[in-house]
Amino acid sequence: MSWHQFIHSNSDILLGKPVVKGTRISVDFILNLFATGWTKEQVLENYPNISADSLKAVFAFAAECMSEESFFIVPTKVA
């Protein structure tokens, strides 16, 4: 899926956070809903401006962002 038609960033909207086009609903907000246990159906019911394709785009965007980053576990010293 190409997320570009559903997700955009504008410095005048939420300080430039990526949002679902046509809304002020940020990608991280939607991801946090899922992280706290919301279902696709709950998101779509509670946010009618978001489509099923928009939700797919949120995950495609997040996956692309994650693939461009390197993550390392930094060991911490245990006292």
Image (cartoon, helix red, strand yellow):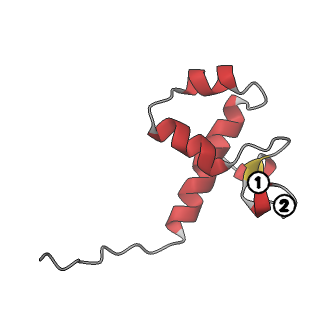
Secondary-structure class at tag 1: helix
The three-letter code of the residue at mark 1 reads His
Q: Which labelled disc corresponds to residue 4?
A: 1
The three-letter code of the residue at mark 2 reads Asn
| Contact? badges 2 and 1 (CB < 8 Å) | no
Q: Which labelled disc corresponds to residue 29?
A: none
Q: Where is residue 5 in the image (x, y as percent from the top left)?
A: 80, 48
Q: Nearer the viewer, residue 5 or 39?
A: 39
Q: Nearer the viewer, residue 50 or 26?
A: 26
Compared with 44, 69 (above or below) is below
- Residue 41 lies left or right of residue 79; in this view the side is right
* Residue found at the far left of this picture: 79
Q: Position of residue 14 (x, y in %)?
A: 77, 55
Q: Where is residue 17 in the image (x, y as percent from the top left)?
A: 72, 59
Q: Which residue is denoted by mark 2 in the rendering? A: 10
Q: Where is residue 40 in the image (x, y as percent from the top left)?
A: 56, 27
Residue located 83% across and 55% down the image = 13
State the image quarter where residue 46 is shown.
top right
Secondary-structure class at tag 2: loop
- Cα distance between the residues tagged 2 and 1: 13 Å
* Residue found at the far front of this picture: 79
